[in-house]
Amino acid sequence: MIGRTIAAALAIAFSLSPSHAQPQHRLPSGYKWGRCLLVVDGQTRISGRCSYQIETGGDFNIQGRKLVFAGIDYPDPHSGAGEMSKDYWAVVYKDGDIWAGYANSDIPETHGDERWEELRREGACYIGKNIRICLWR
């Protein structure tokens, strides 16, 4: 009886030990977890859990769950040349009277080399020619 109790206690302690806990990715201040969809030219780049930030005026950015952040996942490089990316990301912003956006076309890219003009909002999504960006909080 005592042996079973000790074995049960050890099994519980072992299952709750930090070595078996799922690591929780830390986010920068102002970022939250949500669900996102990013489809470009028929290629799904982000689908499901993502991090996001919404700014005043409705501008927002989304990141795939593997994205790393300067100052959290690696030292702050204090320069764009030292930035790194481990996933896709996208930005949607108001440009005058229209919505526009940009994103990286390749995971390692840290600059927005793809740009979209005249996105239209449909519910939680912004849609343009060959682009669909959605954010659900």
Image (cartoon, helix red, strand yellow):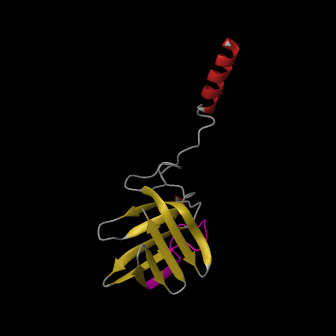
Q: Could you tell me if residue 70 is visible in this image?
A: yes
Q: Could you tell me if residue 79 is visible in this image?
A: no
Residue 53 is situated, as x and y percent measured from the top left of the image, at 40, 62
For the C terminus, which image quadrant?
A: bottom left
What residue occupies the far top of the structure in this picture? 2
For the N terminus, which image quadrant?
A: top right
Q: Residue at x 36, y 71 (%)?
A: 59
Residue 41 is situated, as x and y percent measured from the top left of the image, at 60, 82
* Quarter assignment of residue 44: bottom right
* Quarter assignment of residue 88: bottom right
What residue occupies the far front of the structure in this picture? 1
Left or right position of 46 against 79:
right
Left or right position of 13 against 137:
right
Q: Main secondary structure of the magenta part?
A: loop
Residue 45 is situated, as x and y percent measured from the top left of the image, at 59, 70
Q: Residue at x 58, y 63 (%)?
A: 87
Q: Is residue 10 above or below residue 57?
A: above
Residue 114 on the magenta segment: yes
Front residue of this view, candidates 136 and 78 = 136
- Which portion, as a residue range, is magenta? 103-118
Q: Residue at x 33, y 65 (%)?
A: 55
